[in-house]
Amino acid sequence: MSVAGAAADGLLVGALRRIGAVAVFFFRILAQCLPALGRPRVVVHQVYNAGARSLIIIMLCGLFVGMVLGLQGHDLLARFGSEDALGVAAALGLLKELGPVVGALLFAGRAGTALTSEIGLMKATDQLTAMEIMAVDPVRLVVAPRFIGGLVALPLLVAIFNVVGLFGAQLVGVQVMGVDAGAFWSQMQAAVELDDVAEGIIKSVVFGAACSLVAVYEGFHAAPTAEGVGLATTRTVVTSSVLTLLLDYMLTAAFL
Amino acid sequence: MRPNRALEIGTGLFVLLGFAALFFLTTQLPGSGLSLGSEAGYRVTAKFDNVGDLKTGSPVSMAGVTIGRVQSVGFDPDDFRAVVTLRIDPQFDRIPEDSDASIQTQGLLGGKYVGIGPGGSETYLKDGGQIEFTQSAIVLESLVNKFFANFAGRGSDGDSSKGQAEEPAKEDAK
């Protein structure tokens, strides 16, 4: 099941084998999720690692993404003389696309790499093997809590990203560009449906599962060397990013 | 277990913040309710035959300057008209009582706002007052319908004035 083994196959077979290995690993994690939830302290620790520690970067990026939306949205809408729709444009852009996607990309870079290198280093230092010798399933003790932590953390991070982004957009749109504050918020409230918010939340849950799964899989299957852990970390970022954008297209097509 | 305690507090704060953000997004964005800016000022009402898509929070402006906000848009079941409550900022307290209110559109695709044209009265609008002279929102569809109805009506009459009107236009087109 190791990645080194997959490389020996052809390109197509190797890719198929990797997808199959990820799927098998996913069900192994799912089977261990309930037992892992029986140790809430471990899970809380992982929510802290994946979520609370990513908070600053998420808020900072959310603010700037929102501010850019305010500027670009104003420039675009001003050409049609409808700057008042800026609130709607910024809210829909953030809720449906930018929040979940940019949030997931940042999450993959900030939390996903940490997960991969942590688990990979555990493997390189034979900690996972030691657990197996003691008849402790490392998937239950190490992998499942981290997966749940990422799954819980990303939707919350995306929600925070969206709120901060909205205030960034209103900061630039209303305070700097002079869009009317009442029109900004009232049109936003009138035009944004609960479905739009739900779409963003569902996307963030799916991205959270995908990015966390990729991160723990790459860590767990990393070659147990310094180089192997480094390569696994790189693969985490690349695979998570591509997967996020791919899933985003599929989910958007499904929702529209 | 001090580091563990700090960690749990940090996680708690993060989860609380996350759910507060989710709550904001799900409850405050769809549907109105978010109060903005000051609530100070006085309230006057105006009745319109048609308010178009005037919304709570839309600006009230006089000579292009925003002087207040639409506080609520209601419906009077007795005379089948819309009742719009306007909150005017306190410093604009000398609006003549016989001013007129009209519903206008910002730009081609913009939202609706209430424009107030000053009257000539020496007495001013006070809290709870009502603007008597109102002009409804212009509904583009009905304007287009009216235009085509007129056009079709004239066409069926087949009078000479239409022919005269059309010929110079054709020449211009060439």
Image (spheres, rainbow, N blue to C red):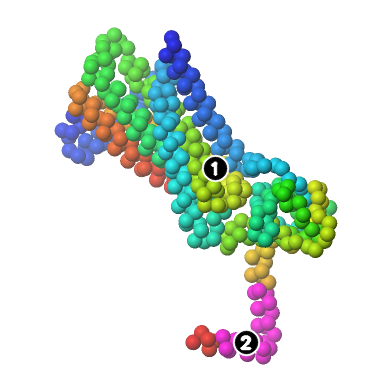
Would you name the residue on which mark 2 appears? B165
Q: Nearer the viewer, residue B14 or B87?
A: B87
Residues shaded magenta: B147-169
The residue positioned farthest toward the left in the image shown? A8
- In the image, which is nearer the foreground, mark 1 or mark 2? 2
Is A16 left, or right, of B50 in this rendering?
A: left
The structure residue drawn at horizontal position 68% and vertical position 49%, both measured from the top left corner, is B69
Q: Position of residue A126 (x, y in %)?
A: 23, 15
What secondary structure characterizes most of the magenta part?
Answer: helix
Is residue B167 one of those drawn in magenta? yes
Image point (56%, 85%), residue name: B169
Residue A200 x/y as whole percent: 48, 40
Q: Chain of mark 2?
A: B
Number of marks drawn:
2
Per the image, label 2 sits on a secondary structure element best described as helix
Mark 2 nearby-residue class (10 Å; few <14, some 14–19, many ≥20): few
* Label 1 sits on residue: A195
Q: Residue at x 73, y 62 (%)?
A: B117
- The amino acid sitting under disc 1 is Asp
Please state, as top left, top right, bottom left or bottom right, where the N terminus of chain A lies in the image.
Answer: top left
Q: Quadrant of residue B147?
A: bottom right
Marks 1/2: CA distance? 52 Å
The x, y position of residue B93, in whole percent, is: 76, 51
